[in-house]
Image (cartoon, rainbow, N blue to C red):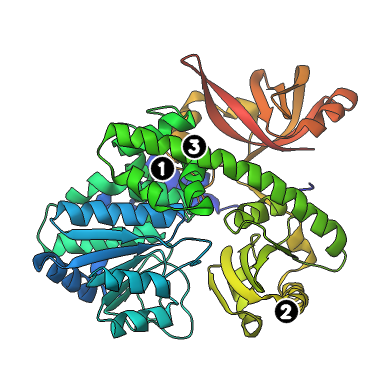
Amino acid sequence: MQLKWEFYEEYPHEVVDELKRQLLAPELIVQLLLNRGLRTIDQVQAFLNPSTANLHDPFLMKDMERAVDRVIRALRNKEQIYLFGDYDVDGITAVSMLYLFLKDLGGDVHYYIPDRQIEGYGLSAGGVERIAAAGGQLIISVDCGINSIDEAKLARELGVDIIISDHHEQGSTLPDAIAVLDPKREDCQYPFKDLAGVGVAYKLAQGITQHMGMDPHYLEKYIDLAAIGSAADIVPLIDENRVFVKEGLLKINSNLEVGIQALIDVAGLRMGKMDVGQIVFGMAPRLNAVGRLGDAMRAVELLITRSASQANLLAKELESENRRRKEIDNVTLDQAMEEIDSTYDPEVDRAIVLMREKWHPGVIGIVASRIIEKFYRPTIMITIENGIGKGSARSIPGFDIYDALKKCEDLLMQFGGHKYAAGLSIKAESFSEFRRRFNEVARGMIAEEDLIPKIAIEAVVRLDDITSQIVKHLRNFAPFGPKNTRPLFVSYGVEVVGTPRIVGTNHLKFRARQNGEVFDCIGFNMGEFLTRLEMGSRVIDMVYVVEENEWNDRKTVQLRIRDIK
C-alpha cells in the first residue's frame, strides 16, 4: 500500500537551543520532545518521569463527590453493590479493579457483564432486572452506560440506585442517575478527556480513598489492571493514561498477581519483559476472546482470583477460546472479502459497509479492522439475525465515525462509541438506505488525500547519528501508543549490504550501511520489497523506528522498517 511521508514542523532555533541548554540533551531528543508538545522543563519531567503524584484531583470530575458519597454509604451500610461492565478488556479490567478495591474495603460486591450475543453492548434491561431480583441496591456501570437512558430509568423504578462511569461520547440527554462520571460530558471540566473506562473507574476509587483519608499510594496495588485496560483500549498514552500504563507495567514486571501471571504463561510472553505491544497483541486478545464467544465473566474471574490453580485453569480456557476465535475470524474475513468483491466500488465508495446473516457478532469488529488494513477505508460490518442487525464500526485517522453515524441516526435503532470505533443496531430493511447514506456522509467528510495512509516522520537522521546515548534517551519515551508512538526517522541514501532475504512468513531482513555504521533491519510483512532490492538500486531511502532486539540474553539495536523508496 502506498504511504505518504509527512514531516513534523521545524521549530525556531532559539526554541530548540533553549530547551537543549536546560535539558543538556542531544538536539534530536529535544526535537522529539517538542514534537510531543512539550515546551517547558516541568512538562518534560512529567512526561519522562510519569508518576501517580501527577494524577489530577478526582473531584475535578463532574458528579464525583455525589458518586463517592453514595459508594461510601453503601460500604458502611453493607449494601449489595453490583458492578456492571462491558465485555471488552477495558470493561473487564474496570470491573476487576473496582471489585478488588471495594472487596478489600469490606464491601458486599458482585459483578455482572452482559452476554454479547443475547443482551448486546452496555446496560441491559435484563441485567438490571436480574440485579434487582438478586437484591442489588447500587449499580456502578463501568465502560458503559452514558447513553442508557431507559435502563437507568428502569433501575430507579426497581428501587436500585445507579452510578454511571463511562468514557464514551454522550447523546442528547444524560441518564437519570445518582451520578454520571464521564470526562466527555459536555458540562464536565475535567482536565483530561481521554481516559479509558478503567481510567474513569480508577478515578472513582481514587476519590473514595481521598475522601476516606487513606494513603494515596494504596491504589497502586490495582494499577496493573488500569494499565492493561488502558493499553488494550488504544487510548492516547499521554497525561494520566501514561501514568497508568508506565506504573502498571512496572508492577506487572516486578510483582505479578496470579491471574495475570497465568495469562502471561499461556500466551507465551516473557515474564519481566512486558510492554504495551505484548498487552495489546498477547494479553488483550485472550481476555477479549471469552467475551466475544461467550461469557466474559470468566476473564473477570481470572483477574480477581488469588488461587494459582484456579488461575491456571481459567487461563487455559481463555487460550482455547482465543484459538477458536481466530478460526472464526479467518472464515468471516473470507466471507467479507466475497461481499466486498460484489458490493464495493472503490471509485465511488469512501467507506465499506457489509452485511450478512449469522456472522458471529463477537468477531466482526476485529474483521472490520483487518479490512481497514487491506483497503484503508472506514468499515462497518453488520450481522443479521431475526431481522435485526448488530454492527461494529471502525475508522481511519481523520474520520469521526461516531459523528458520521449520528448523521444517520434516524436509520438506526441504537448506536454508541467514539470517533475511531462504534457499535450499532439496525433493522435489516434499513440496511440498503443506511449503506447509501453512510457513504454519502463519508464522501462529504473524507477528502481523496485522506484515503492515502500517512506516516509522520519526526526527524531526518544519518545512521551514524544513532548512538548508544540516543538509544538510551529513546527508552525513556516508552510506553509507546497513540499520541506517543515510537519515533519514526528517515535516512536518505542508505546502502543495502549483504544479501536481503525473507524470514518467517513474509518479513524482509537486510543490513544497511551509512557513514561506516551498519545496522540490522527488519520489515514485517514487507516481503514484496525483496525483488526490488535484488534487481534495483542498492541505495535506498528508508523510514524506520529504532528498537532493541533481545535474543539469547544479548541486546542489539535494530531498525524496524516502515517504508522504502
- Does 124 appear above or below 521? below
Question: Gap in Å between the C-alphas at discs 3 and 2?
Answer: 38 Å
User: Looking at the rendered structure, which numbered label has been put on residue 435?
Assistant: none
Earlier-in-chain disc, 3 versus 1 = 1
Residue 232 at what x, y percent from top left? 47, 49
Bin the neighbour count of mark 1 within 10 Å (Cα to Cα): few under 14, some 14-19, many 20 and up: few
Which residue occupies 62% across, 79% down?
Answer: 412
* Residues under numbered marks 3 and 1 in contact, where contact means CB atoms less than 8 Å apart: no
Considering only vertical position in the picture, is 205 above or below 276?
A: below
Secondary structure at numbered mark 1:
helix
Mark whose residue sits in front, 1 or 2: 2
- Kindly identify the residue that appears in the image at 41 percent across and 42 percent down: 21
Q: Earlier in the sequence, mark 3 or mark 2?
A: 3
* Callout 2 crowding tier (Cα within 10 Å): few <14, some 14–19, many ≥20: few
Along the viewing direction, whichever of 51 and 385 lies nearer the viewer: 385
Instruction: Identify the image quadrant of the C terminus.
Output: top right
Q: Which residue is mark 3?
A: 319
Q: Which mark is residue 429?
A: 2
Which quadrant of the structure image shows residue 511? top right
Dot 2: what SS? helix
Provide residue 124's location: percent of width, then percent of height. 43, 72
Which amino acid, mark 3?
Glu
Whether residue 299 appears in this view of the structure is yes
Residue at which label 1 appears: 21
Is label 3 or label 1 in front? 3
Question: Which residue is pictured at 58% across the width and 63% down the height?
Answer: 420
